[in-house]
Amino acid sequence: MSSVTVRVPAKVNVQLSVGPLREDGFHDLVNVFHAVSIFDEVTAKESEAITVSVSGKWSGQVPVDDSNLAIRAARALAKHAGRGYGADLLIQKDIPVAGGMAGGSADAAGALVACNELWGLGLPFEDLMEIGADLGSDVPFSLLGGTAVGTGRGEQLSELPTGGTFHWVFALADGGLSTARVYAECDRLREASAAEVPWPQLDDSLMEALGTGDAYALGAHLSNDLQEAALSLRPELAPTLEAGRQHGALGAIVSGSGPTCAFLAIDALHARDLARGLTTTGAAHTAVAAHGPVAGATLL
């Protein structure tokens, strides 16, 4: 093949429980990922070297040097295969950058799947998951999709059954938030409070809500231990969350490390009305309706 395109989804964390700071600088997590219908597309074309270019709404915020996670993914795959492959990676960017929706991880997952196909490697999914885990904690879920619980740093995944489709609205903020900075702020706030940090545990009520497809119950059990830190760094997110609740959201939460705010709706019609309400009142400059769960990295 001379060109391969892969579609990769954004994610929202319906539960993100963060344990105490470990000696290695990481935290043990219970992280319930949910893939939603906001997508990037990664196209890999034959080339002598590994390069990347980006188009789409967020293209100006994406690095195209060696720090780009898609480039790192392609190089890691070539190293794993033991050969000096090349690929021109073209990313069509619709997932917000540094928005707490795993956009960079999605692009890495897309590059792994696309280059595996372009180069005719035929590596099994398990190998791609292993390579992805070395690149970042969210990359394996971007490959897997659906709904899953991540433990360890979030990269050890177990699929979770869901009983139906959930409808969401995402309020996209100007500018991003560094994941590392949000975790550092979380640690700072915890140290200042001197309260004991509990070991993260999976919420059984949230599991039941996902399994039965009960949006009302899911909305009542959304949780994110990074939300306080994100609001500390970006206080303007608090009024956005409150506006969503006033417009009837079943649950309102910062997505991952933020600054995207996620709102759970009753159904598709309610999601459209909620998105319209957030933008017309000025609570969000952009609000996007989406649904989940959706598949992970998929060849087109």
Image (tube, rainbow, N blue to C red):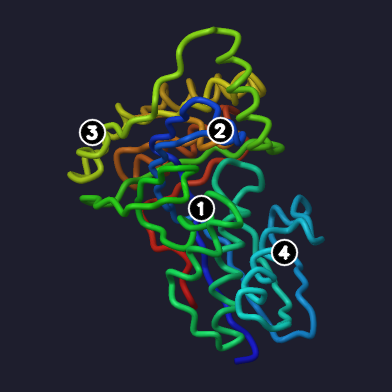
Between marks 2 and 4, how big is the CA–CA gap? 28 Å
**Mark 2 or mark 3, which is nearer to you?**
3
Please, is residue 140 above or below residue 87 in the view?
Answer: above
Q: Amino acid at mark 4?
A: Ser
Nearest the eye: 174 or 113: 113
The numbered dot on residue 204 is 3
Between marks 3 and 1, how big is the CA–CA gap? 24 Å
Name the quadrant containing residue 184: top right
Query: Residue 255 placed where, x, y %?
Result: 51, 37
Please, is residue 283 above or below residue 97 in the view?
Answer: above
Q: Amino acid at mark 2?
A: Thr
Q: Which residue is mark 1?
A: 10
**Mark 1 or mark 2, which is nearer to you?**
1
The numbered dot on residue 280 is 2
Nearest the eye: 274 or 100: 100
Mark 3 vs 4: CB contact within 8 A: no
Query: Residue 201 placed where, x, y %?
Result: 33, 31
The kind of secondary structure element at disc 2 is helix
The numbered dot on residue 55 is 4
The kind of secondary structure element at disc 4 is strand
Between marks 1 and 2, how big is the CA–CA gap? 25 Å
